[in-house]
Image: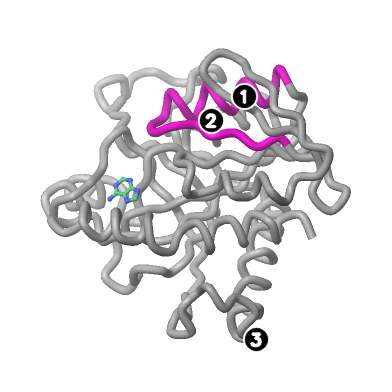
């Protein structure tokens, strides 16, 4: 199995470069693809950039140029639920493009891919399980104090559920309400996951998305996101990514 590993920002994945054996860096267009193995398992890592188009472009390149047969995405998200706290981890069981509105096309029936009506993409059980195993192992390692560089106060809760994707950084109570009014099941919001899920669905390959809560998608979201991004995320997301390969 060859895994395509995507992160939207350098801090979210690129430090994993040091764990890639037989590393070969290949450039296509604006992106660099880090090809090699981790623990004997084939990987191609790539930085997507922000948003659905960037994510879809990256996923398509990984599939068509590198022949990956599964995709893993790791990064940050804003919480849409009061019980989700900063630092908690969400494993997607479905991914939803919350900014698409086809309600005026309700009369259309029987549409098939490449047309989708709901833009809700379930994550295969096997892909959920693998992601959950990595996150659970990360929790055990935290408990066993294996990461001196991560605060000993960090005890994230892990949730499995629906993740929403839209081309916007959500940073207001009003913005959150707009999303949750249409999609009350979403646990958190981000900018890439469901686009990757759509590409994976187009090619019938599994994809897993793991998100760490960096902010509450409210008026303080910018500060909280920036603080989390530059202080903690590299250690957390890179370690979870590494554990996907053990
Ligand atoms: N990623 C992290 N926080 C986010 C937010 N509030 N909105 C969209 N994407 C995010």
Q: Secondary structure at mark 1?
A: helix
- Report the front residue among 15 and 125: 15
Magenta segment = 44-65
Q: Secondary structure at mark 3?
A: loop
The dominant secondary structure in magenta is: helix
Pinpoint residue 49: horizontal percent, then vertical percent: 44, 32
Q: Are marks 1 and 2 in contact (CB under 8 Å)?
A: yes
Pinpoint residue 84: horizontal percent, then vertical percent: 35, 70
Whether residue 46 is visible: yes
Report the disc number at residue 144: 3
Q: Residues within 10 Å of mark 3 (few under 14, many from 20)?
A: few
- Report the front residue among 160 and 55: 55
Q: Which residue is mark 2?
A: 198
Residue at 66% across / 26% down in the picture?
62
Q: Determine the CA span between mark 1 and mark 2.
A: 6 Å
- Residue 163 left/right relative to 20: left
Q: Which residue is mark 1?
A: 202
Q: Determine the CA span between mark 1 and mark 3.
A: 41 Å
Position above or below: 61 against 34? above
- Residue 2 left/right relative to 241: right
Pinpoint residue 189: horizontal percent, then vertical percent: 34, 49
Report the disc number at residue 15: none
């Amino acid at each position: 199995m060859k895994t395509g590993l995507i992160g939207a920002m350098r801090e979210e994945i690129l430090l994993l470069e040091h764990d890639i054996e037989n590393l070969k860096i290949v450039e296509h267009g604006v992106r660099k693809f880090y090809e090699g193995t981790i623990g004997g398992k084939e990987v191609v890592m790539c930085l997507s950039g922000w948003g659905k188009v960037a994510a879809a472009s990256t996923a398509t390149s990984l599939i068509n140029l590198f022949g990956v047969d599964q995709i893993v995405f790791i990064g940050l998200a804003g919480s849409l639920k009061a019980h989700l706290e900063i630092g908690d981890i969400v494993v997607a069981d479905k991914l939803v493009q919350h900014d698409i509105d086809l309600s005026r096309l309700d009369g259309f029936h029987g549409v098939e891919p490449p047309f989708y009506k709901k833009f809700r993409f379930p994550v295969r059980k096997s892909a959920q399980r693998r992601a959950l195993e990595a996150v659970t192992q990360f929790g055990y390692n935290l408990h066993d104090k294996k990461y001196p560089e991560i605060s000993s106060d960090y005890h994230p809760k892990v949730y499995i559920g629906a993740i929403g994707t839209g081309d916007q950084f959500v940073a207001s109570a009003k913005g959150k309400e707009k999303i949750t009014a249409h999609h009350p099941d979403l646990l958190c919001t981000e900018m890439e996951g469901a686009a990757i899920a759509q590409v994976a669905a187009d090619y019938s390959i599994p994809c897993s998305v793991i998100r760490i809560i960096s902010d509450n998608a409210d008026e303080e979201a910018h500060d909280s996101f920036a603080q989390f991004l530059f202080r903690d995320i590299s250690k957390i997301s890179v370690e979870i990514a590494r554990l996907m390969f053990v």
